[in-house]
Amino acid sequence: MRLSRAEYKDIVRATEQLRPTRQCMKILKDRFPNHSQSTLLSIFSLEYQKRTKRTISRHHAADVVESHYQRYLNEAKARPAAPVLLEMANEVDLSPALMGRLILDRFLQDVSGEMHSKAVLNSMLKEPSLIPDQVLANNIYQCTINDCCYGPLVDCIKHAIGQEHEVLLRDKLKERNLSFLDENKLRTMGYDKTPDIILEVPIAVEGHIVHWIESKASFGDDYSHRTYLNEQFWSYWNRFGPGLVIYWYGFIGELDCQRDRVTAQNRILQL
Amino acid sequence: ILRCKRGNRFVSFLLNFLREQSSPALAHGTPAKTPNRPRPAAQTGGLSERRACRSAGSATTSRSSSRVQLFSPSSSVSPGAESDAAGQLSGVSAFSSPSFSTTWNPASRPSGSDRRHGQRVSLGDFMTSPPDMQPSPFQSQKSRKKNMALGAQGRGGRGSQHSDEMGFWDTGSKKPGRGGGHSRSREQLSPPSTLNFNNLEDFPPVGSSPISISKPSRRINPTPVSAERPRSKPKTCFTSTPFTKLSSPPMGAEVLDGSMRVGSPLSLQEERELLKREKSKRAQQPAASSPCLSSLEPCTPPKTGVLGGAKVTPELQTLCPERSKVTFTPELDLLAELYCACISENLVPNIFLELFFVMQLLTSMSPPSNDAEEQESFSTTNSVHNCVYFAVTVLENQFQLVAHLDKGALRLLAENERVASFSPALRDLLIQAQGKSSAKLSPSVSTFIHSVPFQPDTDNRSNFGNDKAFHTFKKQRDVFYEALREWEDLHNEPGWNFDASLGGRIRGMMNQLTSAGNHSHFARLFLKQLVQMCKGPRMSGAPGEPPDADLLEMLGADGLGRLKRLEERLIQPHGIVGPCPPPSFPGHQEFFRDFIQTASCCQLNQHLQDSLCQQLLQLDEVSILSPSASIKEEDEDGDMEQQDEKQRFSSVLLLARLLAKFLGFISFLPYQTSERPSREIQEASVALVPVLDVCAVLDNSVRRRRTILTVPWLVEFLSMLDFVGPLLLCYRTLFMCRRLQLRRCADVCYLNKLLLVSVLGWLFHDCIPLVDQQLLYFCCPFLSEFRKLLAAFVSGSTAKSGGIIRKITPTSAELKDTPIANRSQQKLQGELEQAFFHNQPPSLRRTVEFVAERVGSNSVKHMKATLVSELMDRGEKILRDKLKSLNFNTSKLNESICALLCDAGLEALERKPELEKCFFCCAVLIRREWKIRFDRVMKALGSPDSVNVSGAEVDPIAQDRPVGPKKKPGSERAMICPPGCDHSAALPSDVLIEMKELLSIAVGPRTEAELPAGSQIKALLHRARDTLACRKVRRRRRRNCNVFFF
């Protein structure tokens, strides 16, 4: 699942007009039958996050929020059973879950004044039945459940995937009888930077010395790789020497040919 | 006699005399490429840059000349003249400033007939013969007269200073400026009669200047063609110190500039220009060098700077030195004997400088001059025949010293046709010595560079006062490595500047350090990283690109090393630096030096200084195994221990030298100025106590007979001296320290590598066999100059047969096959081992080594007592039988029995699978034991044929280190799964995703087609149940996980 940059670009281009719904995911899957759903979802998710980061500010402007809210109120009154909020989100190209959050936030301002807490908002997003307005609760639920990039459910799944892969990795290492320290152990020992795994006895994988392993349950694109490098990998390298990163959902093949000394020195492996 | 004060003066006289006498021959030097390095960037760079250098141009000038020459005449040169020279140098046209010579100042050169005398004086200057000294008996009439005249002048000028015991050293107050009242001619003819060791121009501090600025990159004297031209010969070519890449100046102005490239277009252009000029000059030379010139002043067609395929002036090659043409043989013998005595007694400032001089004599060239003229020559060593004769005689006499050179130099010496024709005996000795030499010039380069490992014991939160400090330091570690990586990647790029690129970040970091009070932590990290990267023998310059993995696989590490050397040879012409290069910061050391300078943080410096001092004093206390313990035992255990001890010693020594250099650098940094400080400042600084009590350390070391360790690192420390340093009392008393036998060899200001060389030369006679050649060459990389000089001669003399021949053994790329795979496997195994220990506390390594050694040693003993002794008995029986029955060729018999025994031993081992790994060890053991047994039997039988068979000095234990202890398995928590669970349940996240999808359909919007059947929902619920029940996460269908290496 090492993608060439061209392949990756193709996928990215295909995601440009998509919305984060299961229908759009299906389109993407049909278009790229050779790639696993997880990889496609991971790439789409990363791209969608970038898109959101670019555009989110304009949805947060007070007047925009107000106009969204009024529009929702009007349409929900007219068609109480329709997925009004979801349609609205898709129309203005905002993540449904985020749209739900905006509207709920605005709604709570009316109900309990300015002083509602973030915790209340979050708990309502997780459990829409707590929302006093039934129609809004339905709409919010539709938004969070249909969004495949944002929202409490997605966060939960992402977290689960991350955990699973770490467990998977530890099991693999135990199977091979390798001695290692995991993140929790490292933290209790007072390490200032903690990769997922530090091997007590380094191993060689395909001719490369490996002292530590970091598991990433996502696709490795330029942006995330660069960010990880600066925030994590170099720090690990500075403390523990060379190591290994696993992108479980694939990565851009060209990343290892970067002019970056470390990546250039090292190769990508198919386990 | 030689050891008394007068002797001292005599020695300097003798040395100058020799140089003077041989200067005509040496003017031609070695017929080889002149070091045609391009000029350092500092010359083209702005003035400010140059100012940033430790010393101004004038200091540089004289300094480099004094590095080159033993006793420079610069004290006789008026300050004005000095600055003239400097001005000339600092101009943009410095490179082509035609008649600049390191010793002779054109501005003060007299004209007309005086001229020659004036020049002569520059070498005869220090004829400090006491009044009662007899002129050397071997001097011919005329030259004696001349020298006497000079001597008289000298005496006249000296006054009564030398009656004072310290006068020899103390005349420093007589600065050249004071002699301003002298008339010009007098200045020329009556040079100062004492060696003014306190004179900073004669003996400037070692680290005080980048010599690079001062020295034209070649010996060519490209003066405009004129009748005078042949007379202006370079006087000091024999010890010139041209600029090389490695001798980077302390401030690194050039390095920062980044344009210190071999063969930059600009310098190439300039060299072409020069070459052109040379050519036209030579075309006109016949007219210029008219026969009226005396033989003492032979026409000296300057050497060409060899560029590309340009040849060495062929007409110079025509004269071959012949044994039969040697004149004044008895005088030469006497002179050589005297000279050798000086070297043996270590009376010369630097024995290797003398050796270098001798080699230059050996390889000198002479212009074709007619024999009749030569007969009338008044000098003993001015003909090439005499030079070579003298050199060969000295080399024969000093063979013990010569034999310690590296293999390459010995080979070149042995192959030198002059050596062969003058002394076949010497040649034979050299060939023999080659076999014994173990010194290598290019140490293997470690490609395995690590960061300092994070150790919870010293680095975790509990070691910091508060969270802020802890987290600040976390960031600082990363910033530090980022800077290091950036430096590694970019510092060779043109236009890259340390301060401009990293200065901001580093200073920001220093501010944070200060506010968080983390200096000690950072200082520790800094020093650890320094030691890690720079402790080993010099890395081959810049780290550059890591070797290509495929190439490495194809060639093997060894092949790649050869390829590298080949590349170096092709790219760099051999630049002869001379045996006294200035101190430098090669490889990664440069980063650390620049970092300290850029950070410019007094707290950090103090921490570094304290830490360095402490570590050094600790290292200095490291126990050195007494020789009796290691030498007495003749069996292999003793050998091994001794070997280990040597290794340990060399590692301690290298480390101490590195730390001492940086301690010196930081200690003297505040006093580094481009100008000589004013008198008041000097006096004030002299009163201060230096960081390190050099006298006490040295005293202690001498008392405890540990100078072998202490002196080399003290030298490194002192090599960083500033202007004032040499005046400090402790440094001066250091060299009064007679017990060191360094007596006259080192003056305070000359205190640099010279001392180390002398020390090491002296150490060869030491009873503790700690220093081996390898270590010597690591510590004194300039020793390779001998080989370069000789190689230059070879290439020069073969030029006449049509081109420069360099021995290059081609390396061919082989296809991957098993042995190579094995080799890379071995390499990887080694790297893994290194990597493992790297992140562990050092105590673990010691423990593992101890255990491994004990186990290995016991195994060997066991094997020896059982299997091997049995085999030996068997072998002895066979041997005795055979010897009785037949008249055998004993050496053949010996070999065949040995092979037999080895086979038998291996066979026996095969029956014991647990001993599988002992194969190699066993074979070595059998061979060694058999040799001893064989010798014993032969001796008992009275046969002279005890053969040196094995010679395999392999450490059997090292081959068979046991692997680290295995971790106990099964400490993990048991997975509680329902009985019969095959762990095939879906991943929780997959179930979650499915459920979410189902829900989203349920909540809508949806199409009818999307509606799931009841069975689908049921199946999902079953899956969810299974997933919840199974505790083991299985790797599902994901076949491809993707991995990145760091």
Image (cartoon, coloured by chain):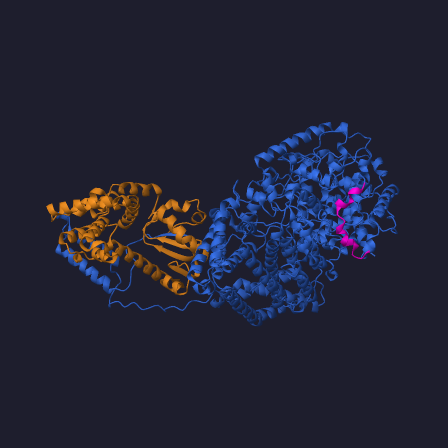
Give percent across and percent down for residue B694.
66, 60
Give the side of residue B764 with respect to residue B656, left or right: right
| Main SS of residues in magenta | helix
Q: Confirm whether residue B954 shows in the render.
A: no
> How many circles with numbers are drawn on the protein?
0
Q: Give the chain coloured orange.
A: A
B166 magenta-colored: yes
Along the viewing direction, whichever of B279 and B150 lies nearer the viewer = B150
Q: Is residue B828 above or below residue B909?
A: above
User: In front: B15, or B72?
Assistant: B72
Residue A93 place in picture, x, y as percent: 23, 43
Side (left or right) of B1028 relative to B1007 = right
Colour blue belongs to chain: B
Residue at 29% over, 61% down = B1033
x and y percentages locating residue B480 in the rendered image: 48, 53
**Quadrant where the image shows the N terminus of chain B:** bottom right
Q: Is residue B473 shown left or right of residue A81?
A: right
Residue drawn at x 71%, y 32% as measured from the top left: B223
- Taking A27 as reference, is B631 above or below it? below
In this rendering, position of residue B677 left or right of residue B830: right
Can you tell which quarter of the image residue B611 is in? Answer: bottom right
The image quadrant that residue B86 belongs to is top right
Q: Nearer the viewer, residue B191 or B465?
A: B465
Q: Quadrant of residue B1022?
A: bottom left
Residues in magenta?
B164-182
Relative image position of residue B365 (x, y in whole percent): 74, 39
Residue B650 seen in the current view: yes
Asked if residue B480 is among those painted magenta in the image, a careful observer would answer: no
Q: Is residue B483 above or below residue B767?
A: above
